[in-house]
Amino acid sequence: MSTDKKPGEAERTAHEQIVRRPVQIAGVTIQPRDSAEAAALPVEPLAAPVAVEGQRCGLVAIVGKPNVGKSTLLNALVGQKISITSRKAQTTRHRITGIRTQGANQFVFVDTPGFQTIHGTALNKSLNKTVVGAVGDVDLVLFVVEAGSFTTADAKVLALLKPGIPVLLVANKLDNVHRRGDIAPWLGEMQERHAFTEFFPMSAKQPKDIERLLGVCEKYLPEQAWWHGEDELTDRSEKFLASEMVREKLFRLTGDELPYTSTVVIDKFDEEPGRTSKRMLRIAATIVVEREGHKAMVIGDKGEKLKRIGTETRMELEKLLDAKVFIELWVKVRSGWADDEARVRSFGYE
Ligand SMILES: Nc1nc2c(ncn2[C@@H]2O[C@H](COP(=O)(O)OP(=O)(O)OP(=O)(O)O)[C@@H](O)[C@H]2O)c(=O)[nH]1
């Protein structure tokens, strides 16, 4: 065997050397492409990533019934808006990963749609599947409820949690509780319901509470190398974030009249060479509603509402993506899409 080293080869880590042998991942043997010599070596299972000293990294799921503040909490924990929030229940429809790297710790958060208990549509079945998938294999679950309250809808979410995974009870919206003395007996009742590892009364709108919560979550992260780069905020695409942003403005600006079954499809997401150093994005999106009446509601008087949805989305996306954004919005009526499984999938739901 030749001992000649190419320049720089001496600096290779032990982990890189192992990857150059044939390896088995999920039962499949993968041959290295560049070395016939290495291919002759015995096949070895791929070693786990070598932990960089002191690094911790783990998955934290955020679960709870609709409207308890999960997305607000995720955005605050990540320190950037990546999940949409609104006063209207059931705005979160996808599993969203938010990443926060702080000191030696990398928290990978998974936000889930509020568990749907009322309607049995194809859309709601798909949303519930996302929740069950998200809580299966994580290091910690943040079970979010409104402080002082526990309803049947909360109980249904709690019943989904698998034994063996630590669950922290996040009693959110503490700022809405005027009689703080009521919280201690309520926590006692909660203790009876589930073996929560910790109780955390807080407000997702209080930066101090967010820092304290990160401190508590830290000890549940296993010691292992980070999965994401230090600057990464989310694993969702910019296109996805754009559709979520349109959806948020849509719900915020149409108030309670527009049913939550309205959705947004991105038809075009193109990056064009800008004249300055700033990136330039050209986006076209269609808002899909169920009835002609909803379409009129979204367009508004002389197109005023749709124009505002477009302007507010553009302003927020320009900040988030650090780019100049042009956005064009359309509204289409597709009756019964939330009941149609094929259509639910074609709109990007699992
Ligand atoms: N007063 C108060 N309001 C909060 C707090 N956290 C969230 N909210 C509000 O609660 C509402 C719902 O918040 P979201 O973060 O959208 O809730 P969600 O649980 O993600 O909702 P779904 O997407 O329906 O599952 C919004 O109006 C938030 O501003 C809090 O700590 N205090």
Image (tube, rainbow, N blue to C red):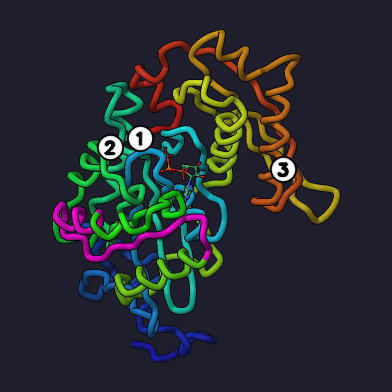
Of the residues shown, which amino acid type is indicated by label 1?
Answer: Glu
Instruction: Please determine whether, in this image, residue 133 is positioned above or below residue 349.
Output: below
- The x, y position of residue 243, in whole percent, is 56, 36
Q: Secondary structure at mark 1?
A: loop
Decide which of tag 2 and tag 3 comes sooner along the chain. Answer: 2
Q: Secondary structure at mark 3?
A: helix
Instruction: Please determine whether, in this image, residue 101 is positioned above or below residue 98.
Output: below
- The x, y position of residue 338, in whole percent, is 39, 20
Can you see residue 77? yes
Q: Residues within 10 Å of mark 1 (few under 14, many from 20)?
A: some
Decide which of tag 2 and tag 1 comes sooner along the chain. Answer: 2
What is the spatial separation of the Cα atoms under label 3 and label 1, in whole angstroms?
Answer: 29 Å
Of the residues shown, which amino acid type is indicated by label 2?
Answer: Lys
Q: Quadrant of the N terminus?
A: bottom left
Circle on res. 129 = 2
Asked whether 187 falls inside the magenta stretch, the response is: yes
Q: Secondary structure at mark 2?
A: helix
Quadrant in the rendering for residue 194: bottom left
Question: Is the C-beta separation of discs 2 and 1 under 8 Å?
Answer: yes
Question: Is the C-beta separation of discs 2 and 3 under 8 Å?
Answer: no
Q: Residues within 10 Å of mark 3 (few under 14, many from 20)?
A: few
User: From the viewer's perspective, is 178 left or right of 268?
Assistant: left
- Taking the view exactly as shown, the residue that stands out farthest to the top is 292
Circle on res. 315 = 3
What is the spatial separation of the Cα atoms under label 2 and label 1, in whole angstroms?
Answer: 8 Å
- The x, y position of residue 37, in whole percent, is 32, 76
Front-most of residues 231 and 186 = 186
The range drawn in magenta is 186-207
Instruction: Please determine whether, in this image, residue 290 is positioned above or below residue 155.
Output: above
